[in-house]
Amino acid sequence: MEERRASKRCGGVLPFIIGFLATCVLGWAVIPGLFFDKVEQPVWFSHAVHVDGQGMDCESCHYFRDDGSYAGFPTNEVCAECHAVDPEEAMEAIAEAGIDPSDYDAIMKAEIGAIEDNLASGDDDMMAAEREYVVKYLIQGKEVPWLNYQFQPDNVYFSHAAHKDMTIEDMAELKKELSDVVDPSVFEAEEFPEQNCNLCHMKDIHLNDVPPAFQRNILSGYSKMTMKMWKCERCHALKGQPNACYTCHK
Amino acid sequence: MSVARRAFIQMSVGATVGILFTPTVWVALDDVSIWTQNWPWIPRLKYGEVKSVPTVSKMCDSGCAVKVRTCAGEAFAVAGNEDNPLSGGGVCPLCANSAQVKNSPNRIKTPMLNGEEISWDKAKEVVAEKLDAAGSSVAVISGDQNGTVNEVFSALLADKGSDAFYMMPCDMQAADKAWTGLMGGYGQIGYDLEGADVVLLAGADALESWGPTVANLKAFAANGSGKFLFAGPMQTKTAAVADKWVPVPAEGMAAFTLGVAYYVLQAGMTVDVADFAPFRAMVMNDYSPAKVEAATGVKADRMAAIAKQLLAASNPVVVPGGSVAAHGAAFALNLLLGGAMKAVPEFGKAVSTAMSRSEMLNKDILEGVNADLLFVYEANPAYALPEQVKAGFTVAFDSVNTETTASADLVLPTLHGFERFDDLASPYGVADATYSLGVPVSKPSVNAACAATFVLGLADLGFETFEEVLEAKAEAVGADMDALAEGGAYVAPGETPVAAGLAANVLGKAAVPVKGSGALGLVPYTLLNVGTANRATTPNAPCTISNNQLLGDKMVVMMNSATAKQLGVGVGSKVKLSGGNGECEALVQVFEGVLTGAVAAPLGMGHTVGDEFSKGKGDNVYKILTVSSEAAAGASTWAGSTVNVAKI
């Protein structure tokens, strides 16, 4: 009899509520963060240094090619227009110094003239980053494996050219409907920027000095910022654009 | 205890319900669904600038001028080059898949000495030692018919006191032996297929596998008013689109051509050469239509009708294929008609001690090769000529594994055509002297090197690299290297052919049809999507090979219903073909476009080394070809091969 009473007392809704609340808190506040690894970019690249410091604009590196395709990340060929280290000359100098060309630390420590004399940075930290880029990638003939915050898988065809004429001002009319798709603060500026990059990319990335870590989903490998299909579809629907599979999946 | 357990269960239920009110489960499900789309073995795309870069491809015998589609500097596809007259925007089936071959796992990845990986320095040491030991007993077999790489190899031979330069068997060789050797002509014979009003393709499968196939197709398309006649033992794809197909056995082609010449001579046509009278007498006496009909089975009235068309034309041309005699007869007929046959002058040499093209074509590989040291350059004699080639030590240069590299002592991986400098000088058949340059469009993907540059390191031939040789070649040609690198071709017009004679004595004897002792005539034919003597079919091509060539892994041979009835076989019958010193197995297909008493078999299958697309597919018809001597012409030929066919 006593046992049954005790059971009734402890078997109320309290354990249920405790469990419910605990997982709610975990599910909203803790677990989502566990889905992502933070990965740093291969070398420090400061947009601020290039844009503010050197007066470059977005199109200096991220431009449309003659055939209308989008260049995306700049290649070594583009970077070498300013970072004018001659790979052949540098490699010859490395060989003359008896250093293994794949021993990056040794090359950076050796302060090879063919490299050091052509570094463009003024400050030590920036020069270290530039040196790292030159030694690890430029003179090795390897492209930098930049991590794309807006990574889309191979089965998605996204054309920058098809989206280049959209303006933030026009899209601001749909800011309520797009509140889950576009960072709402993008629509809050007093004056909208000429380019529409902020609609999909990290807001004001051109002012960024230290690139944020790339948050890689531990299951899918995608970026945390990868735009999911429903977001694409919502915007297409709102703008009266087709949402057929073949629109994006060629 | 039971209280705690109940509370635990209730809390668990609460937790389970609670988690459903968070995004965790739904996001995790979404992520898992994405995870299932990204297996590690799914190939990843390469992103970067997509370009269309002009160069040349040497997969086919003639070579193609192409534009290679690259993404971030990696070749991924091939298209024609509309700026180059050899292509006109077209590309052959072999070269169309050259990018896939470049990226194939069948590439040779590093130098190999008797199956062991070695360095390039070690390879050079080994070859230099063998070269010293061999003295003048050095030979070269080249699978490249029109590249300056042959100048480098032949100059090496000259440096060693050898003249043993061999080309793989080709119509260009038969043409040169007839034109330069027998008739004392100058230059390389070419045919203006676009400008001709009547074209008699006497054995030349011009729209499928003969000569510059792509340029031929373009010429055929552009020549809307011209009449194309095809003579041969089988209704090939060329014959299928020609205005008329005249069934003529391969061994009877020379006699058939002289039979046509009979009517042309009868019409009073002449050539201003010393032996015209004996030639006329020989044709009128020995190759009268009745005699030719008796020897070849071709009706006299058919020859008369063809001769009538040729005589009525203002710019006719006869394009031969097959034996030296067939070529000689066709050249004589062209000289009588005075039409669209051209003499294409040879470009100047880059390497002064190199052989001329005609000298390179002089040695007959069908008569056999035997040397202490043999260099094989992008050729596959172990597949196509297994019995003719013997060597103390074989160095095989190739970009992919073949029967020849498998049996060679030293295998040296060459850069793929899209990774190296190369050139294409007047492929046999073009009407004008044409020079095109190939430049690297992609970085080397394996530890390969340029074969010519390697050879230049073995002897002092005046150049350090092949690129320097090609600069000298462009200068000798009179072309601008930069303009060539942009994909255009340097073109010098072909000239009116002039011969010293018509080789009356030789042709009279050599044109007599000689057939083997087998029960059926063998009609070997080449389709570029199936492969050539040097190149196996390519990764994308097998799906284009029809059931008339390959069914499953079985080769298909074709014969007409009369022949099939005679043999007691039908469609799908399994047969064994015996000829030469070998045997082949095949399935039968009945096709009325094959001469009665003959069986048509596709060349290029039955590889024992290679990739999944070629290895073990069909059988090797080269095994059953019979080499017969054209004694009068001083040459050898496969024409007249016969086989015995048994049902199994």
Image (cartoon, coloured by chain):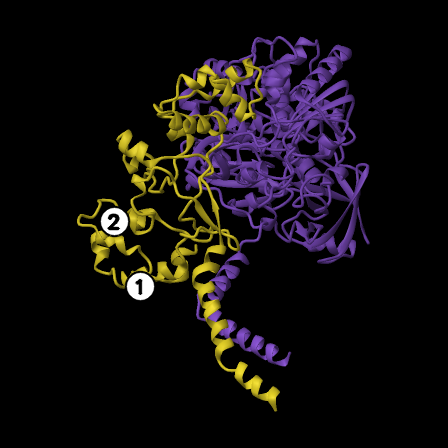
Q: CA distance from mark 1 to mark 2?
A: 17 Å
Q: In this picture, is A194 found above or below B34?
A: above
| Residue hosting label 1 | A237
- State the quadrant of the C terminus of chain B: bottom right
Q: What is the crowding at mark 2: few (fewer than 14 residues within 10 Å), some, or many (at least 20)?
A: few
For this view, does B87 lie left or right of residue B289?
A: left
Q: Residue at x 57, y 77 (%)?
A: B9
B474 vs B618, left or right, is left
B445 or B391, nearer to the observer: B445
In the image, B245: left or right of B286?
Answer: left
Residue B6 horizontal/vertical position (percent): 59, 79
Q: Residue furthest left?
A: A190
Q: Which chain is purple?
A: B
Report x, y in % for residue B507: 66, 25
Residue B79: percent from left, percent from top:
47, 39
- Chain A: colour as depicted: yellow
Q: Which mark is residue A165?
A: 2
Please say if B612 is above or below B500: below
Label annotation for residue B285 = none
